Image (spheres, grey):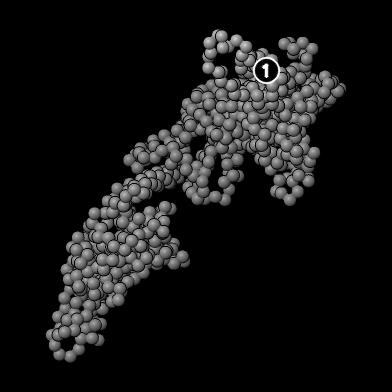
Amino acid sequence: MAKPNDLFAAIPEPEPRRPAREARGAPPSAEAAYTAAHIEVLEGLEPVRRRPGMYIGGTDEKALHHLFAEVIDNSMDEAVAGHASFIEVELSADGFITVTDNGRGIPVENHPKFPGKSTLEVILTVLHAGGKFDSKVYETSGGLHGVGASVVNALSDVLEVEVARNQVLYRQSYSRGIPQGKVKEIGRVQNRRGTRVRFRPDPQIFGEGVRFKPARVFRMSRSKAYLFGGVEVRWNCDAELVAGTDIPEKATFRFPGGLRDYLAGDIEGQTRVHPDIFAGKITKPGGHGSVEWAVAWLGDADGGVSSYCNTIPTIEGGTHETGFRVALLRGLRDHAERTGNAKRAASITTDDVMAGCAAMLSVFIREPEFQGQTKEKLATSEATRIVETAIRDPFDHWLAGNPVQASKLLDWVVERAEERLRRKQEKEISRKTAVRKLRLPGKLADCSNNSAAGSELFIVEGDSAGGSAKQARERQTQAILPLRGKILNVASAGKDKLAQNQQLSDLMQALGCGTGTHYRDEDLRYERVIIMTDADVDGAHIASLLVTFFFRQTPKLIENGHLFLAVPPLYRITQGTKTMYARDEAHRDDLLKSEFTGRGKIEIGRFKGLGEMMPAQLKETTMNPRTRTLLRVTVDDAERAATADAIERLMGNKPESRFAFISERAAFAGEELLDI
């Protein structure tokens, strides 16, 4: 008989057809060597032992623990159906694991289709035999294919099962799927019913020394109690297996709060976008069992959805998760429309909503369809509609009843959408630069130095000042970017306006370093970014707007010491051949007293702006590294909160705060704004 690996061996190609006279006396054809004797018929549980991967996904640690999942899921089906109130899990040092429930117990009478054979033996030795095909026995269940118990039996070197029914105890033992005798009646028992399965995975299949992981079995057992509040799960483990770990030897799990308790424990200590957990449960949606959920959004960590169908973990998601995502997306969009923010929310997607979303989802439905025997992905198409319908109204009510938290959540999701679009744009720009030079703003007069080291970008106010600065600059190391008038106040403008502002877009394109969490210092095209505005109040206002922009959008640029303020003069003082420049009125008066004494007419000229200065004057006073003065913009860690508060107070969207500040300190308002 051929080996299994020979079943699909390559068949030699037949030789070219020859004339009949040449074929006489030729050796037998290749077809003649492939006969009915080569066809194997595997019976009983032999297919499981030959190809375990077809039934449990492989023979690794994950597949090993799938055996435990199959057994405890059978007990959970009894609990969900209302026939069991507790499940006991016991892990022993000898490699055995035992699962006990107080359900109805597997039937032991002879099966009508297998004369002389107990139903218990049929379930444990015949593939596709079970009680989950008839919805009258189990309205919702995790076992659908009738192979779970028999697969566990086939892949265990020892399996022992006890059944207590009608106050009588029955027992049967197996080895690698083969009964070691008939079902035995042990005797009468009091106050006991249900099924106990004790088994040890076969080392011939999983390898010598392979054992269940206590921590993993502990988590799997606990999760069952969270998924169905009506069951109590009892945990018992040999002390030597959990020595030196935080896993207890004994524990009892019962969680009436269900998934809300489960999620709260998982995200404890993490920062949330809003403090509450959106949770609920709807029974009989669409005539099915139930839909239960718990959702929170994390502000400083990645989230993730843990979903279950009939207590089976659907690791790869499926149609129920699709309905869940759609319900949250449509709920947020509807809320945005009700609150006048429809335009802001137009670009959000399910990926934006689920970013940072920590969620638990559990559905109970009749006759679910899974992809594969390991049931890692739900394929029931109706589950999408069931889950979306169940969650939409409760989510709408939750958003309407918590307007402050709903606003925070919407802002957070919109920000995720804007980050996604920004990443997409940056990716497109990066892709373009791989084949051609990055497109720079048209008004940028770039320097010839290709390295960021030693190079400077002057951000100047208006085309007139830009023209003077371009003539005054050192072309090799100094670049000029003129801006038109006052830029957008990012402290009071919405994120949609920020994204659409062409001047700020040009500025960031020239810098090349990205914004927010996508800032990359190594991509900054200049070592120094210098804000060079007029020396009057309007210039100070423009400088404050730019500093606010950098503080909000590129704080790392400030922290790394790249941002500076130029100090251009406001006055030119001349007496004979002597010329000096003053930055403001106070400086002018000091110079007049200390530097300009004696005879001779003193002429004082006030610059209306940088564009009024001759290029030589601008170079001498403001741009030449040997004669200029630069102010580095810094924020100490100790002052960060105070700085953020000052920017919000003076630059935010509450004009009354600015009015109060100016009223109290009118004489110094301009200086304070410049010092932020």
Label 1 neighbourhood size at 10 Å, few (<14), some (14-19), many (20+)? few
Residue lying furthest front? 21
Which residue is found at the position 83% from the left and 25% from the top? 190
Residue 189 in the image, given as x and y percentages of width and height = 84, 25
Residue lying furthest right? 187
Relative to residue 616, is residue 110 depicted above or below? above
| Quadrant in the picture for the C terminus | bottom left
Q: Nearer the viewer, residue 625 or 28?
A: 28
Q: Badge 1 is on which residue?
A: 38
Describe residue 437's horizontal placement relative to residue 383 as left or right: left
Q: Which image quadrant is residue 590 in?
A: bottom left
Residue 488 in the image, given as x and y percentages of width and height = 28, 55
What's the residue type where badge 1 is placed?
Answer: His
Tell me, yes or no, if residue 88 can be seen here.
no
Q: Which image quadrant is residue 8 in?
A: top right
Q: Nearer the viewer, residue 126 or 18?
A: 18
Which residue is found at the position 39% from the left and 37% from the top? 333
Relative to residue 357, is residue 362 depicted above or below? above
Residue lying furthest left? 601
Disc 1 element: helix
Which residue is found at the position 71% from the left and 20% from the top? 1
Residue 186 in the image, given as x and y percentages of width and height = 86, 23
Describe residue 562's horizontal placement relative to residue 158 as left or right: left
Q: Nearer the viewer, residue 12 or 247?
A: 12
Relative to residue 41, is residue 218 depicted above or below? below
Which residue is found at the position 67% from the left and 17% from the top? 38
Residue 115 in the image, given as x and y percentages of width and height = 77, 10
